[in-house]
Image (tube, rainbow, N blue to C red):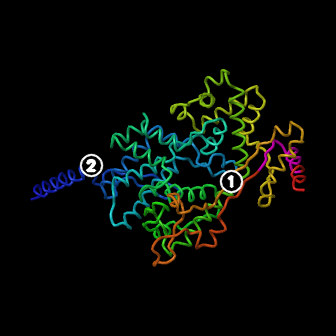
Amino acid sequence: MAKDRLRVRILFYIVAGSRAAFRGGRRVAATDGSWTQRIRDPVHGLVVFGDSGDPDRDETDRIAWNLLNTPEFQRLRRIRQLGFSDLVFPGATHSRFAHSIGVYYMARRLAEVIARREGRRDPDRERIALLAALLHDIGHGPFSHAFEAATEGLGRTKRHEAWSAEIVREDTQVNKVLRGVDEDLPQQIGALLTDEHQTDIYSTIVSSQFDADRLDYIQRDRLMVGVEFGHIDLDWLLDCLEVGTVTVGSDNPVQAPCLYLGPKGVHTAEEYLEARSRLYRMVYMHKTTRAAERMLEALLSAAASGLAGSELARREPVLRYLASEAPTLGSYLALDDSTVWSALAAYSEHGDSQVAELAGRLRNRVLYKCVDIGIRDVPDGNLLGRFRSRLGEAPTKLQEAVLFDDVAVASYRWYDFYDSSALNKVLVKTHNGMNEPTDILGVSDIVKTLRGERRIQRAYVPNRDQAEELERILEEAQG
C-alpha cells in the first residue's frame, strides 16, 4: 500500500510538473517551491525570489535572479545611488544595485494591484514590465546623475536611459539572459526603457507618478540620509490605487489606461508629493552636494583638455572615455565610482594646477564655498543676471574661479490633457461618482503650493575670502 501511494504521488508530480512547464505556448519553470533565493533589504525586509505559488511569477523571478548575477548588473554595486550626497549625509552610501532590487520588489507589488483591480493577470506583459523595472538603472554612470551632467558639458549627450537600452539590446550578458528566454524580450524591454509615455497599464509600473522607481527611492533615500521627514504610508497608498482610464487628446481623444487614487487616498498623495518635494530641496539639491557636482564638472572639462595626448590619457579609463568622439558600450561599462576615485588620485599628482587642485579637493572634501543668489531674488527679478554683470568688473582671477549652478526644480509639473503627457499627472477621484479621475492639482490646496518651478541659482568659489567678495558684489547687484 505504501509503495502504491508513493507511485501515485510521483505520477502526480510528473503530470503537474509537465503542465507547469508548458503553458499557453510559452515555456515556464516547473516550480514546486524548491527554488528560492532571498535578499535582506533595509527598506523592504526580506525580498524573496521564487516560491510564490505562481509558475509564471516564479519564472520571472528566476530570470530576474539571473540578471542580478550578470557583470553589467553587479557593476551597480560600485555606483552610489546619491552620488556625492554622502559628503553631507554620511549614511547615504547605498548603491544603485540595492535600489534596483527595491524597484523590482515595488514593481511586483504594483503588478499585484493591477491583477487585483483588473481581476486577471497578463503574464507576458507583466514580465516585460517587471524586468524593465529591474533594469531601469543599469545604464547609470559613475556618481549617477552627477557624471551624466558633467559629461553633457563635454558634448556627451547620451543619457543613462539610452545606455540602459543598449545594454539590454547589445552583446552583453544581460542580453544573453533575456534572449535565453525569448529572442524578442530584449527589444521589448528596451522599448519600454526609452519610451517617455505609457502604452498600457503595465507600463505605468516603469514610468508614471506612482512607478516602482519613485516608490522605492523616496523610502530608501529618506532612510539612508537619516532625515525624519518624508514618510509615506505605502501600504495605504497601494491599497487606494485603482486601475482606470482617462481621456487624452483633443483632435482624436482616446481612453488611456492609468493608475489613480480613490477618495481615501488623496491625503496620501499629498504626503507623497510633499515628501518628494522636500527630498529635492533639502537632499538632492543641497548646496554642498551641488558644489561637489560642479567641481566634478569643472575637473572633467579641465582634464579632457589639459591632459589630452598625455601618457595618463592613454591608460586611464575616464580620460579614454572623454577623449572618444563615439564612446563604445565597453568603454562606458568600464566606468564606475571606484574608477573615478582612482582617476582623482592620479589627477591630484599631475602637474596641471587646476586639474590637480580640483582632484585633490574632491578627494579630501575641501569643497568650494557657496553664495546663494536665487534665495535673495524676487519673482522675475533677474538678480543672477545683474550679479554676473557686476562680476564682469571684478579682477579676472576671481571671475575665472567662479562655478555657477543654475537649475530649475519642479516639485509638481502641470500637464494638460491634450496628449499622453497627461499620464504624468497624479490622478485622483475625490468621490466614487466621478466618471474619470482628475489632476490632484485641481482639488488639493496643498499641491497647489508645490506647483511651478523653483530656480536654484548659486555661485561657488574656492575659499572664504572670495566668497565674501562675491557677497559684496551681490549686495551691490541687489541695489
Image quadrant assignment for residue 54:
bottom left
Q: Is residue 273 left or right of residue 406?
A: left
Eyeballing the image, is 116 above or below 367?
below
Q: Which quadrant would the N terminus be assigned to in this image?
A: bottom left
Q: Which amino acid is tagged 1?
A: Ala
Q: Which mark is residue 408?
A: 1
Of the pair 449 and 107, the residue shown nearer to us: 449
Magenta stretch in the rendered image: 458-471
Closer to the chain start, of discs 2 and 1, is 2
Q: Nearer the viewer, residue 451 or 333?
A: 451
State the SS at label 1. strand
Mark toward the viewer: 2 or 1: 1
Up/down of 401 relative to 317, above or below:
below
Q: Quadrant of the C terminus?
A: bottom right
Q: Distance from label 2 to label 1 (Cα)?
A: 48 Å
The amino acid type found where label 2 is placed reads Arg
Q: What's the residue at 71%, 48% (across, down)? A: 290
- Give the numbered dot on residue 189: none
Residue located farthest toward the front when viewing the structure as drawn: 251
Membership of 117 in magenta stretch: no
Mark 1: few/some/many CA within 10 Å (<14, 14-19, 20+):
few
Judge from the rendering whether residue 477 lies leftward or rightward of residue 241; answer left or right: right
Asked if residue 374 lies left or right of residue 176, the reply is right
Residue 460 part of the magenta-drawn span = yes
User: Where in the figure is residue 362, as x and y percent of width and height?
Assistant: 72, 39
Report helix, strand or loop for mark 2. strand
Residue nearest the viewer, comparing 233 with 165:
165
Q: Which residue is mark 2?
A: 26
**In the depicted structure, whether residue 72 falls above or below residue 109:** above
Q: Residues within 10 Å of mark 2 (few under 14, many from 20)?
A: few
**Is 44 above or below relative to 331?**
below
Look at 56% across and 41% down and name the residue there. 78
